[in-house]
């Protein structure tokens, strides 16, 4: 397990928000021989492992009606969401295509298998 304390999360959020993008390596180009990104969705999530990984998520997503102070976003309840939706959302946060600094920092701390496990578990929660 990789716990992210609030202070560490804020530090990561700040680092992500102010990252010097020109110094980053260019994105790899996809060729015909390279497998499609859909291969990442072939991972099978383990709900038992996912249950152990979501403890930091409960701090925001486990409180009904909770809103973040920075920035002021509504924090949705995740239990019972579609596994595919959760997998796609966390993957997009990890890649940076879905924007929310705290969620990007959280998602970047997880491997693709961790994300599959989290999605598998949260999809079973009522």
Image (cartoon, helix red, strand yellow):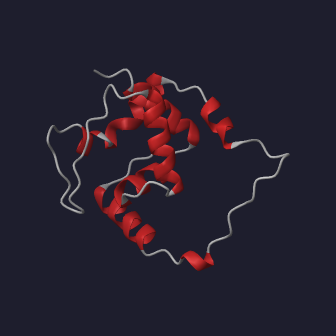
Residue 7 appears anywhere in the view = yes
Horizontal and vertical percent position of residue 89: 44, 43
Check the picture and name the quadrant holding the N terminus: top left
Check the picture and name the quadrant holding the C terminus: top left
Q: Above or below — where is 36 with respect to 126?
A: below
Horizontal and vertical percent position of residue 85: 44, 34
Q: Quadrant of residue 11?
A: bottom left
Q: Nearer the viewer, residue 85 or 101?
A: 85
Left or right of residue 125: residue 82: right
Horizontal and vertical percent position of residue 97: 49, 56
Horizontal and vertical percent position of residue 67: 17, 51
* Point 18% across, 60% down: residue: 69
Left or right of residue 109: residue 63: left
Left or right of residue 4: residue 38: right
Q: Quadrant of residue 54?
A: top left
Q: Above or below — where is 8 with respect to 37?
A: below
């Amino acid at each position: 397990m990789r716990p992210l304390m609030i202070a560490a999360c804020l530090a990561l959020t700040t680092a992500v928000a102010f990252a010097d993008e020109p110094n980053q390596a260019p994105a790899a180009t996809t060729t015909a021989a390279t497998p499609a990104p859909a291969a990442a969705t072939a991972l099978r999530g383990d709900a038992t492992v996912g249950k152990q990984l979501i403890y930091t998520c409960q701090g925001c997503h486990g409180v009904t009606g909770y809103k973040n102070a920075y920035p002021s976003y509504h924090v949705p309840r995740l239990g019972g969401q579609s596994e595919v939706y959760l997998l796609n959302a966390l993957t997009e946060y990890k890649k940076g295509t879905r924007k929310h600094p705290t969620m990007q920092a959280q998602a970047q701390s997880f491997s693709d298998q961790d994300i599959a496990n989290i999605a598998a578990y949260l999809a079973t929660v009522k």
